[in-house]
Image (cartoon, rainbow, N blue to C red):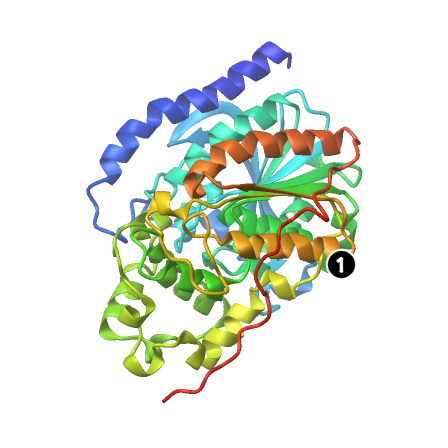
Amino acid sequence: MNRRTTALLSTAIVTAVVVGAAPTATAAAAPAAGARVAATTPDPFYRYDGSKPLSSYQPGDVLKKRTLNYHVFGIPTPLKAIQLLYRTTDARGRPSANVTTVVRSPHGDGSKAVSYQSFYDSLSPEDGPSRAIAGDVSLGGAIANAESLILAPLLLKGYDLVIPDTEGQNADFAAGPEYGTNTLDSIRAGIRTEETGLHSGTRFGLFGYSGGAIATNWTSVLAPAYAPEVNKQLVGFAEGGLLVAPAHNLRYVDGALAWNGVIPMALVGVSRSYGIDLAPYLSPKGLAVVKELERGSILDALGHHPGMTWKDMAKPEYKDPNSIPAFVAAVNKINLGQAATPTVPGFIGQGNAGWLEGTFNSPPGIGTGDGVMIAGDVRALARQYCDTGNNSIKYEQYGLLSHVGAMPYWAPRAMAWLDDRFAGRTAPTSCGRIPAGNSLEPERPTSTP
């Protein structure tokens, strides 16, 4: 296809977003928080029903495949998408099945691709990007649909796209290591499928913001050991608005006007991922909020409980979350400061004007952030990467931008940075110039009264 055709196809995505957003948002406004707006019949494509056990397959092996039109808010576009059910590994090292979507650029040649990690942030698998692409419509899936505005420029530049359901088919929100294995195995699956045009010589860039940054960073961290052959094909990772040490974030958003809603979301997602029962530690209010959000999305959580704190959610004897051994164990497992250092170049952007989004806290040893992510944690991680051998880390802090506000500023800069990596230009570095950050040491348990 020529450039004019490509432009028309990408414009179709953008147009569908603009035209489709208004009626979808109106229809979705009626349900109460936590209510689902999705098809009642589960799509059988997402179920592995083979006779062989999943453990008999290698991570990244393809179990099912299908080709369909790329949809935006339920509206089909001319773009074709190849969806793959593949074998991967969950947070506890068990075989699992997940879905990814490969979209071929109409004028790409299979030499370069971007693995795009969505920030769909949900506790319902119905909100994953693959379901939005297949035409399903849900309130939480609106985010994955709107991200087509980000994907269109990448397609125009000739990048093929790999778009994994990073949270897996149980929607284990905030469980970073699982995000990483899901993403690495989605790249493997794409390479092993002839229809995608991807192969062992394709170069890949990683791209993600917020929840997508969680997946992007853990992918780059786990790649050398979990998928060394994929790591050799990576040109770099670009991320913004990153979750580093979740226990810090809990304290930072405690009592906030909007972002405190991620506390119960993360509790559900991480406890689900690691098989932890937090119910014995929660107050009646905490149990009610968690129940409400069991299958909710970030749109069901933000601003629904302004001013709510951890103490409101916990029984009095557990007012300090570190008095819960299971909590301490879980947050330490997903602390990026305790993980390995990526071996490929990285571009990291972080806002630091959280007051714009109703987060006014500045806890001792933690400080401020963009409303939900903590600038001092991200600086510390970037410095740690520099100090442990990766001198190709570019770090930017946006002092006048909040979490939502930083994204449209960061995205084109991140794309330009990735363009340069694909072009073979030397990666810029901020090493030696990144201000000091916070301690990323593991959390320590405290005793109950």
* Label 1 Cα neighbours within 10 Å, binned few <14 / some 14-19 / many ≥20: few
Residue 420 quadrant: top right
Q: Is residue 354 above or below residue 75?
A: below
Residue 164 in picture, x, y percent from top left: 56, 45
Q: Position of residue 88 (x, y in %)?
A: 62, 57
Q: Is residue 206 visible?
A: yes
Instruction: Give the camera-side residue of 146 and 40.
Output: 146
Quarter of the image that includes the N terminus:
top right
Mark 1 belongs to which amino acid? Thr
Q: Quadrant of residue 324?
A: bottom left
Quadrant in the rendering for residue 279? bottom left
From the top left corner, tell me how far across and down residue 128 is, in percent: 45, 46
Q: Is residue 142 left or right of residue 44?
A: left
Q: Is residue 71 left or right of residue 342?
A: left
Relative to 63, is 103 above or below?
above
Q: Which residue is mark 1?
A: 388
Q: Is residue 134 visible?
A: no
SS for dot 1: loop
